[in-house]
Image (cartoon, rainbow, N blue to C red):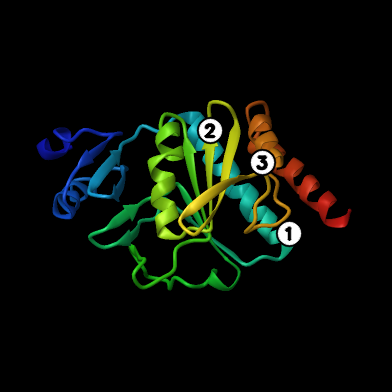
Amino acid sequence: MSETQTQLPTDIWICASWQEYEQAIANLLNEKGKSYYYKGHMRLEMPPVSFDHGKDHLVIIFAVTLFATIKGILATGLDTTTFRKTGVQDCQPDVAYYLRERAQTIPAGTGIVNLDRYPAPDLVIEIAKTSLLDDLGTKRSLYEELGIAEYWVVDVQNTQIIAYAIADQGSKRIQESQVLPGLAMPILEEALRQSREMSQSEVGTWLLSQFQEKEYC
């Protein structure tokens, strides 16, 4: 880790120009850190990531992809990908999805997703172990302005999903996804709870039965 990087505070928002932000993230290239830029402030988030955070991350990706597969919804998921409006906003959500006609929007070979050229994802998900209040606050405002259609925060500590539908740069709480109709938050929360007591493959079998049961009801 470079001397410049160690001098920068992490896990808080600090005032910075876009140029200062670019210099800071250049120092993260050899690390597994995440970075955000919003309203003249930057936030750097550094590892280590907890065991529970990592597990919930995979369970949510599996659940969303499985649901889309069963329902025949085109879906492309992205893991910790950078979405950028140069000089204005930058983010690296834990998970993002492009759905339906947007599933093939971003061409292969793309590095940073340029939001001045491509649309924002339909769904963004943050997995929160120590960053819950920030994920519910500043990051939610960031995603509202970026035009994300739906935003979920997975509260690892309480195995809860706080989901928002976003429209007109505002958001409202929802209990069922609007971009993936029929996918209810309580089902996903139960999957997270079960993952504390059983393997992910067993959780996957349970999710499959739940999604198929709803399909044929």
- Count the marks: 3
**Amino acid bearing label 2:** Asp
| Image x and y of residue 32, in percent | 32, 43
Q: Earlier in the sequence, mark 1 or mark 3?
A: 1
Q: Residue at x 44, y 70 (%)?
A: 106
Residue nearest the viewer, comparing 49 with 183 = 183
**Amino acid bearing label 3:** Leu
Circle 3 is placed at which residue position? 188
Q: Residue at x 67, y 59 (%)?
A: 68
In space, the residues marked 1 and 2 are separated at their CA atoms by 26 Å
Quadrant in which residue 5 is drawn: top left
Q: Name, please, the residue furthest toward the right.
A: 217
User: Which type of secondary structure does the marked residue at label 2 adopt?
Assistant: strand
Rate crowding at label 2 as few (under 14), some (14 to 19) or many (20 or more) other CA atoms within 10 Å: many
User: Which type of secondary structure does the marked residue at label 3 adopt?
Assistant: helix
Q: Which mark is residue 70?
A: 1
Circle 2 is placed at which residue position? 155
* Residue 125 shows up from this direction: yes
Image depth: mark 1 or mark 2 in front: 2
Q: Earlier in the sequence, mark 3 or mark 2?
A: 2
With respect to residue 212, does 76 lie above or below?
A: below
Q: Earlier in the sequence, mark 1 or mark 2?
A: 1
With respect to residue 211, does 74 lie above or below?
A: below
Where, quadrant-wise, is the N terminus in this rendering? top left
Q: Residue at x 67, y 26 (%)?
A: 197
| Image x and y of residue 213, in percent | 84, 49
Q: Relative to 116, is 61 on the left or the right?
A: right
In space, the residues marked 3 and 2 are separated at their CA atoms by 12 Å
Q: Residue at x 28, y 34 (%)?
A: 12
Rate crowding at label 3 as few (under 14), some (14 to 19) or many (20 or more) other CA atoms within 10 Å: many
